[in-house]
Image (cartoon, helix red, strand yellow):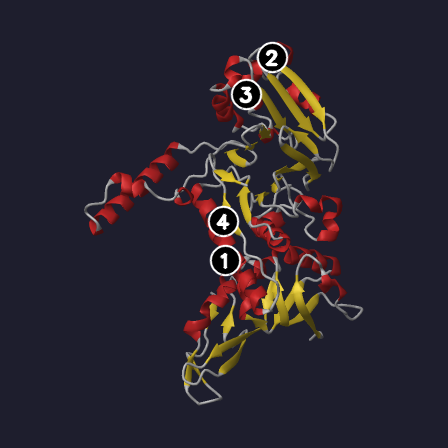
Amino acid sequence: MKVKMWGVRGSLPAAPARSQAFSKVKKALESFVKQQKNNPQLSVDEFLNLPESQQPCYGGHTSCVEVFTDKTQLIVDGGSGIRPLAEHLMAGPCGMGKGEAHIFMTHFHWDHLIGLPFFIPIFIPGNRVHFYAVQEDLEQNIRRMFTKPNFPVPFEALGAQIFFHSMEPRKPQMIGDIQVTPYQLDHPDPCWGYRFEHQGRAYSHCVDSEALRVSRDDLGLDLPLYQNCNVMVFDAQYTFEEAIEKTNWGHSSAPIGLDLAMREKIPKVYFMHHDPSASDEHIAYLQRRTEDYYQARLKALRDSGSDVFEVDWEFAWDGLVFDV
Amino acid sequence: MSETVAIQGHIDESGTFKSLKLKSGLSKELQLDFSQVKSISAGGLRLFQVWLAELGVEQLVLHRCSQGILDQLNSLKAISQLKARVASVELSLKCPHCSSGVDYLAQRGQDYLEGSVVHRESLDLPQEISCPGCGGQVPLESEVSSYFAFLKHRN
C-alpha cells in the first residue's frame, strides 16, 4: 500500500506570492554562488540534487490524500489537491469514462471540499464516483458544492454516476483490497479519521484534529486508530503554544503527535495541515522546534530509565509519496 | 512565603500530577519543587496548564529544575506559557580532571534573571566552580547557558 499527499495545506490554499518566489530564487542563486566558490566544478544539476526533504517547498494545496495498491485506489478529502490528482486520473480509465473513484470525506469544512468542483472525472459520463462518510449529511454537503451561483454546473448535470455511502463509526469496510475504518477525531464540527489496512500494514489518517484526547482512557473507542499502525499522518498546523492559545480551533501541533507516536510505537509520522500563512521558512522553523522537543523528550525518557521508542517523522509536502 | 510542594515522576497525558496533595486554602501562588520530575510531555504540559487554571493558580514558582526538564520546557516555550518563575536550577556537571559529579544550584536574582519591561534578561553564573573531589576548576557558564533559553521566552 502506498500513499500520495496531493494537498498538505490547511484551511485555505496558499500559492506563493511573487515576492516569496523571488526571494527563494535569490537565496538559491546566492547559495549556488557561495558553494561554487569552494567547488568551481559544481554544476547547477548537482546543486539542485538535494534530497527531496531538504528542498524548501511544502506546497499550497489543501487536504487531499491518495491511498492505493495495485488493485485499489482511494482518496481522502476533496481539498484543492484533488485537482492535480484529477489530471493524473484522467490519463487512465477516468479519461475514457470507464473509471471509478472512491472519496472518503473526513468532514465538510471548505478546505476539504473546495477542489471537488474541479475533479474532472465527475463530469465524464460513464465514470462512477463514490463518496463515503460517517456524517449523515454527506449527500447534502456534496450537492451544495455544485450549486448556482457558487458554481455554474448543477449537481444534476454532472456526467458521472454518483453514489453516497454511509459508514458506521469504527466499523471496518472493504473497498477492493483495502480495509477502511473510521474513527472520531477532535474537531469543532464532527470529523472522522480513517485507518487503512492492507496485507497486515496500517496507515492512519488523523487530520483534522486538535487531539484533545491523548491518553488511552480518554481516546477510548478511538484508540485503535493509533495502535499497531505503521504510518500516521497528523495535524500539525500550529506550534505547541499557538495550539494552546487556539483551543477549540480544531488543530494540533507536532509535539502532541509525537507523544502519541512514541507511546503507541508508530514508527513513521508525517505532519500536515500547514497553516495557510506559514511560509516555507516558517514550516522549516516548526521542524526545528519539533526536533528540539523530540530530542529533549528522548533524552529525558532515557535518563529516567523509561521505555523509549524512536519515531521517524517529517513535515509533509505536496507530491510526497510513501510506502506503508 | 507559601509552602513548597514536591512533584514527582512524569508529567504526561495520564495526569497523575492531579493527585498531588495540596493544602486547602491554596494561595494564588503555587511553589513546586521540580527536582524529582523525570520528564514532561507536550500532552502532559497541556493538562498541567488546565489543572493550574482550575486551581486558580496565578503565579507558578518552580524550584530546583534540572537541565533535562529545562530542555523540555524550553523546547515548548513552556515557562512563558505557564507564566512561571524559575526560582532555582540544579546544574550537574562532570569534573574534567577527576570525572566526579559536580553540582551547582543556580538561583534567580543571583545567577540569572528573566527580562522585564525595566531590565534585560541576564545570566551571570560563575565562570568556573571548584570540584569537591579534586579541587580542580570546572567550567560552568559556557557549558550550561543553553538551559537558560527560557529567560528570553518572556511574553
Secondary structure of the residue carrying tag 1 is helix
Q: Which residue is mark 1?
A: A292
Secondary structure of the residue carrying tag 2 is loop
**Of the numbered discs in the image, which one, if any, rests on residue A158?**
2
| Circle nearer the N terminus (1, 2) | 2
Note whether residue B119 is visible: no
Note whether residue A50 is visible: yes
Residue A51, compared with residue A95, is above or below; it is: below
Q: Chain of mark 2?
A: A
Q: CA distance from mark 3 to mark 2?
A: 11 Å
Q: Which residue is mark 4?
A: A286
Three-letter code, disc 4 = Leu
- The image quadrant of residue A184 is top right
| Circle nearer the N terminus (4, 3) | 3
Q: Quadrant of the C terminus of chain B?
A: bottom right
Q: CA distance from mark 4 to mark 3?
A: 32 Å
| Circle nearer the N terminus (1, 4) | 4
Residue B10, compared with residue B46, is above or below; it is: below
Q: CA distance from mark 1 to mark 3?
A: 40 Å
Q: CA distance from mark 1 to mark 4?
A: 10 Å
Three-letter code, disc 1 = Asp
Q: Chain of mark 3?
A: A
Q: Quadrant of the N terminus of chain B?
A: bottom right
Q: Chain of mark 4?
A: A
Q: Which residue is mark 3?
A: A119
Three-letter code, disc 3 = Phe
Secondary structure of the residue carrying tag 4 is helix
